Amino acid sequence: MYAVLTRQGGETTIQELDDTGAVRGAARVVDDLPAEVRRLAPDRPRWVWSDTAVWYPPLLRAGVRVERCVDVRLSHAIIRRSRLTSSSPVATAPEGVWDETVRDIPVAAEGLFALDDLEHVPRRGASQRGELDTLEEFLRQRDAVATSSEPARLGLLLAAESAGALVAAEIHHVGLPWSVEVHDRLLVENLGSRPAREGDRPSAMHAVAADVRAALDAPGLNVDSPVDLLAALGRVGITAGSTRSWELEKLTHPAIGPILEYKRLARLWTASGWAWLDTNVVDGRFHPEYVPGGVVTGRWSSKGGGGALQLPKAVRSAVVADPGWTLVVADAAQLEPRILAALASDRGMVEAGSSGDLYAGIVASGAVASREHAKVAMLGAMYGATSGDAGRLLPRLAERYPRAIGFVEAAARAGERGEVVSTHLGRTSPPGDGVGYDETATPADAERARSRAKAWGRFTRNFVVQGTAAEWALCWMAGLRTRLRALGGDTDLEREPHLAFFLHDEVVVHCPRDLADEVERAIREAAADAGRLLFGDLPVTFPVTVAAVDDYAKAK
């Protein structure tokens, strides 16, 4: 059954539907929603609501969890754009109130964006989500899926997206265990004692900045200014295109070491310093604020200043399990290359990964000479590298694995033509606006259009792989969430094994120490099930590395 929740005029109403979507009885007002959720729990309803981020947190605070839901907001965003439903009323209708909740991520100048720039941009939300006609929209979406060209795939995507929203809310609610004492000690060891005034730089940064100025003979240098730093380097005969660490590491000069050290300390101080600790760790817990589907590929983004999608290595030792508990850390090995092999049904590449290390398998096939070459070539294939080692090695990879390389090449060519591409389950990319030109274009205009087209082709090349990897991860977490709940006997979330952190292809489970082996088994089983859900009988494997540790840093 479905239980559709709506809030109008200050009242919460519930409308029950049967499994076919037919209305069952009249809608009724609910005065105590947590009590109603508990009452209906034996019926295992799928709760239908406008937005998990709005409806679920109050239930969690009341000690109530739900097994399943339909997040109508997230589902609308997928159906609206998917080419599987392009002729449905949901996709063809003029923009309306539901679209106000799913505005596209802003893009950079000229309609293009870098993949790295997408990771931390939250979607904008509407202020009136609770007043939306959830039942009407839900029924439209059911019809759109049923009449789509791939109802089973799209249905799985919507279910996985909604399950991910539940996971995100539960992770935020329960939090990741965090030791303020350990974090403070790490900061003192690296930065010196905490400055007396907020905003003052720590003593270690002052000392290293002095070393930079001395090495460059620039006593008044503002080390925090890239422009001033590049000018100072130029005055001592060092030409650098930027002050990015990877570029500075190629240079030789006595100032380079201190500059790199200053940048390291500055990152630690600004991203994970005392201000971060005071703001984001409450009662020994860091509560990540995820935005499911916050990236056009389906990856999660984050909001707020907590940086849920980046925990610097320098402070991971502060993630400490509770007494008697442990952190079970798992990540999927070589996820995106395996996803590509499955997407393309490239049996040769599937076989290369069957022994555990896909890159070693590629070497064994004779395609390239070393594991490092295999990794570089695969990254080049998925991200569109055409120069250097990647460009040189890619033809060898294409000769040995033509289906896999042909798959991403076809996605790239589609993007260059301004066409959309889709993930395995049907999430579809935005169109490549502005990638073409006509006979009236000047040579400069034509060159800019060609450049935009190639850039968009690099995006669509990776969209199909990264987006499908995100789908696999959602299925993995959904299956793991169910297994963890069974292990805990459906007790309070905080007292049973639970997901405490997620990062693209890595999960952290906080659990009683005596359940660590069972949690590891659940993680591996859920990974295998996710592969079967997406790719059926294709014998692609998705191995995970698992470590049970007292603090997060020991897992790496």
Image (tube, rainbow, N blue to C red):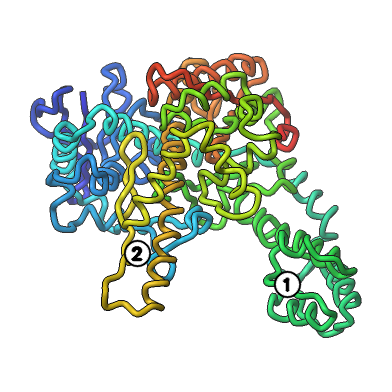
Residue 209 position, x and y percent, is: 83, 72
- Report the number of discs: 2
Q: Tell me the quarter of the picture where residue 246 sits.
A: bottom right
Q: Which residue is located at x 38 percent, y 41 percent?
A: 58
Residue 482 position, x and y percent, is: 44, 21
Residue that numbered label 1 is attached to = 240
Residue 200 lies left or right of residue 450; in this view the side is right
Residue 117 position, x and y percent, is: 51, 59
Residue that numbered label 2 is attached to = 435
Residue 260 lies left or right of residue 396; in this view the side is right
User: In this rendering, which labeled residue sits more in front, label 1 or label 2?
Assistant: 2
- Identify the mark nearer the N-term, 1 or 2: 1
Q: Tell me the quarter of the picture where residue 59 sits.
A: top left
Q: Nearer the viewer, residue 197 or 135?
A: 135
Label 1 Cα crowd, 10 Å radius (few <14 / some 14-19 / many 20+): some
Secondary structure under tag 2 reads loop
Residue 64 position, x and y percent, is: 39, 30
Q: CA distance from mark 1 to mark 2?
A: 32 Å
Residue type at numbered disc 2:
Val
